[in-house]
Amino acid sequence: TLLEPCLWVAPLELQGGEEGGKEGEEGKAVMVVGLSGRSRLYFGEHLAWDGVASVLINHAFGFVLFLTLGTRPLLKFISFRALGRLDVMGGSEGGIAGIEGGMEGGRAVERGARLVTSLHSSPSVLLQLPRGNVEEISPHPMVLRQVARMVDARRYGQAFATLRRHRLNLNFMIDYDPGLFEKGVREFVVPQMMSLEGGGRERGRAREGRRKREDMNIFLSAVDDGDCLGGEGGFWRGN
């Protein structure tokens, strides 16, 4: 039940038993997401945020995206997993601020921008700018969710390349799940090093060997003993 009439409404399926959702079939819960004419964002009976320009749901990446209003609008993300920890007694911002590790984002966008769509096949968001043109961006929370899935599938080469392309912390490959990386490290290191053997026999192999060597040096120089996720690796594990 929403607390006031909403111009934009959408259902959101969550894991069964999570706070704020109504139990549905097969152990799932359904939460209603709404954006009122007064720019208030609701998750069921929770007033989640006061001052929202537009909102989208990306089921493939497990995020609710919304743009805030004001002189410095921001693009913010809330994971499906975190919606079960909404503070029932929270105020307009308390419902979100009370979710530990539940919200990511804060990317500045142009004032007057609106969300158009969020792609399900890639970590991309389309924004309609005030001048009428459309801008495509790749927000870090969506990129990291994609990288997390690559690490889960032990596609370490793709994860490394994606983190480098978006200039993100390479430590994510380890800190996301240290135990998993330790078990699968040979699947990452060995393929990188094998191409160096006999690399001088052919020009193409030599180039590939140099690239692999550079990649390995970059990775080893970037990692450290710190935790770039602050112990919140579970935030990136799916919905």
Image (cartoon, grey):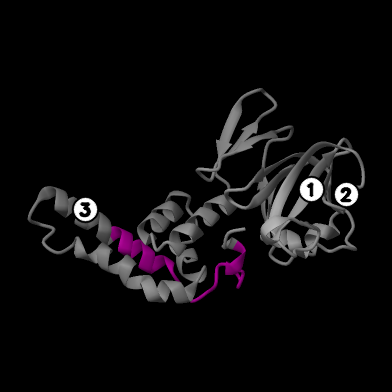
Check the image and name the residue furthest to the top: 132
Tell me which corner region of the image, top left, top right, bottom left or bottom right, holds residue 104.
bottom right
Q: How many labels does the image show?
A: 3
Magenta segment boundaries in residue numbering: 214-235
Task: For the C terminus, give its image quadrant.
Answer: bottom right
> Of 63 and 169, which appears nearest the observer?
63
> Of 183 and 209, which appears nearest the observer?
183
Asked if residue 238 can be seen in this view, the reply is yes
Residue 169 numbered tag? none
On the image, numbered disc 2 is attached to which residue?
Answer: 1
On the image, numbered disc 3 is attached to which residue?
Answer: 208
* Nearest to N terminus: mark 3 or mark 2: 2
The question of residue 222 being in magenta is answered with: yes
Name the residue: 31% across, 64% down: 216
Q: Is residue 32 above or below residue 176?
A: above
Name the residue: 42% across, 72% down: 181
Counting from the top left corner in percent of width and height, residue 154 is at 39, 63
